[in-house]
Amino acid sequence: TVSTIRLPDDGGTRETDMSMDLSKRISPEFAIEIGDTFTALNPHEGPAANGFGNLELGGKYQLLKNGEHEAIVSIGLGVEVGGTGSRSVGADSFSTWAPGIFFGKGFGDLPAAVRLLKPFAITGQVGIAIPTSASTRSVTVDAQTGEQEIDVERHPDVLEWGLALEYSLIYLQSQVQDIGLRAPFDRLIPLVEFALETPLNRGEEGQTTGTINPGIIWAGKYFQVGVEAVVPINERTGNNVGVIAQLHFFVDDLFPHSLGRPLFGGNK
């Protein structure tokens, strides 16, 4: 995944992130994840900085899968491992734990009278990011007076919530009605994502930030590519529109009998 946006700081720093994530199924219902992000910060004035963020680890377990109603629910736990990234790009020295619930619902079970709504689907997540340190203290020295100043940065628990609404032209063509679309348009999925964060305590309650990301995905059998705009929801988030692009390989379809196979429990 590659994203870039200009931050709402005084200098208008441009942040570009390049990340890679790998998910591996241990069983048909349980998977582990590992990922990291390389960040480049380019301020309007001053030196640039770049480096890797903290290592991110996670696990996810599928609680419910209902094919008839196109519904799925999972629970997960992620951890950002403090001290594994570069302080120059803002990687924290402390770890953050993030339990959450994830869900998805297709609308293929709607009646035939509204069949053109069947290709809609909604996915979402709700979780809480819990830092292992409530605050960080740093000491600076005034160059003129020589006096020490102690700065305290608070780290609140944060509600992470979001959803995505998509309309699959693949589903429309194959399951509802063939409207004559041809390649590459017959593999497109328009969507809009909402990614939001709301601090819960330590003086920052209710100061929600986030983005709305309209875009489009082209999905094939073995991989998909997507691109979205990144639109801040308020001034706290920023005033500049960014962009995000993703290339996603389906390892379980590429290598169904080796790398993509669960370690336990069969091929799927």
Image: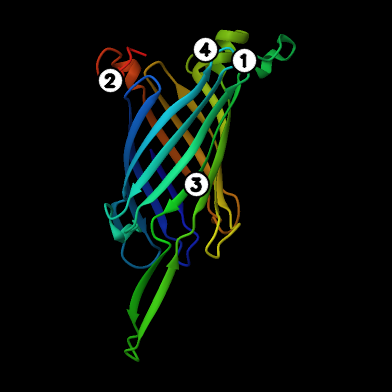
The residue indicated by pointer 3 is: 128
Name the N-terminal-most of marks 1 and 2: 1
The image quadrant that residue 28 belongs to is top left
Viewed as shown, does residue 81 lie left or right of 155? left
Q: CA–CA distance between discs 1 and 2?
A: 32 Å
**Quadrant of the image for the C terminus?**
top left
Residue 263 shows which numbered tag?
Answer: 2
Residue at 67 percent across and 19 percent down: it is 117
Along the viewing direction, whichever of 262 and 243 lies nearer the viewer: 262
Mark 4 or 2: the one toward you? 2
Name the N-terminal-most of marks 4 and 1: 1
Contact? badges 4 and 1 (CB < 8 Å)? no
**Quadrant of the image for the N terminus?**
top left
Q: Secondary structure at mark 1?
A: loop
The image quadrant that residue 91 belongs to is bottom left
Q: CA–CA distance between discs 4 and 3?
A: 43 Å
Residue furthest to the left: 258
Label 3 neighbour load within 10 Å: few <14, some 14-19, many 20+: many
Q: CA–CA distance between discs 4 and 2?
A: 38 Å
Q: Position of residue 89 (x, y in %)?
A: 33, 57
The residue indicated by pointer 4 is: 182
Residue at 34 percent across and 34 percent down: it is 33
Name the N-terminal-most of marks 3 and 1: 1
Q: Position of residue 23 (x, y in %)?
A: 34, 30
Under mark 4, the amino acid is Arg
The colour mode here is rainbow
The residue indicated by pointer 1 is: 108
